[in-house]
Amino acid sequence: MKGDAEQRSMTDDRPVLRARGLVRAFNGIRAVDAVDLSVSAGEILGVIGPNGAGKSTLFNLLAGELLPTAGTIELLGERVERAPAATRLAQGMGRTFQIPRPFGALSVLENVMLGAQDHAGERVFANWLAPSRVHAAERDAKARAMELLAFMKLAPLAREPARVLSIGQRKLLELARVMMAAPRVVLLDEPMAGVHPVLVETLSERIAALAREGTTFLLVEHQLSLIAAVCQRVLVMAAGRVLVSGSPAAVLADPRVAEAYLGGVTT
Ligand SMILES: Nc1ncnc2c1ncn2[C@@H]1O[C@H](COP(=O)(O)OP(=O)(O)OP(=O)(O)O)[C@@H](O)[C@H]1O
Ligand SMILES: [Mg+2]
């Protein structure tokens, strides 16, 4: 088996995630209409646009919650547009939900551990044949979950039930849970919405730090100042299509973008 570092360097010149001609129609109306996109390792791509532009639908297509009407999706060079969400998760595609719903009665730590992929304890035969290996795997998962909680500044709350967390803390928990599966690309749909400014800063710092280590992010966010601060590239959607894409400065200065926001429902 190749080491992680070697595998990463082999794939660095290929896009981590690529979509071509992606279409999704609802009752004949194209919520996503011929979208092309490509992101590379460690990139943070902002996805913006007025309400109803198709941003969440695009994410649902990429993550596998919806099947496209047309078009292709490649994850690390493999075609996945027909693959179920669980398969894409196992292949390296993580996502967070706009409204995180942690298991309130479980501890913060246990919620993060639920994000682990291929957890040995869930395999009945492994359990029966090699209980010591299962214990070792669980110990490793716990250590990794604690590391992630410390990274998200949630370590002091590890043993509290998740229901005590604020909205912002739940979003940090959600990010820790997703990172437990060691994803290569993470889709974040409005992770900062309703979050206290202090935690917004923590969240954007953590996303930037994870990107520097090679994780790719797609970020839907309505606060354009946050997009400008954290993204290298921005894709603007309007009425299902990619209107423009480019650096945050170029995109935000583009008169077509202001027009799309004025023409759409205000946010
Ligand atoms: N399951 C569905 N059935 C029918 N229409 C849908 C469905 N999901 C989304 N749509 C429609 O597709 C369009 C795009 O919606 P989408 O939620 O992707 O927009 P968005 O850019 O995420 O908006 P917002 O910024 O408000 O979250 C909208 O017109 C919406 O009504
Ligand atoms: Mg949305």
Image (tube, helix red, strand yellow):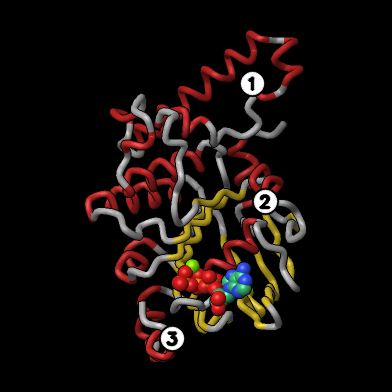
Residue pointed to by mark 2: 85
The picture places residue 237, in percent across and down from the top left corner, at: 51, 78
The picture places residue 251, in percent across and down from the top left corner, at: 41, 80
Q: Is residue 82 above or below residue 247?
A: above
Whether residue 105 sits left or right of residue 115 in the image: it is left
Q: Which mark is residue 264?
A: 3
Q: Which mark is residue 121?
A: 1
Crowdedness near tag 1: few (<14), some (14–19) or many (≥20) residues, C-alpha within 10 Å: some
Identify residue type, mark 1: Gly
Instruction: Give the CA distance from mark 3 to mark 2.
Output: 31 Å
Res 234 visible:
no
The picture places residue 122, in percent across and down from the top left corner, at: 66, 24
Nearest to N terminus: mark 1 or mark 3: 1
Res 154 visible:
yes
Nearest to N terminus: mark 2 or mark 1: 2
Q: Residue at x 73, y 19 (%)?
A: 124
SS category of the residue bearing label 3: loop
Instruction: Give the CA distance from mark 1 to mark 3.
Output: 49 Å
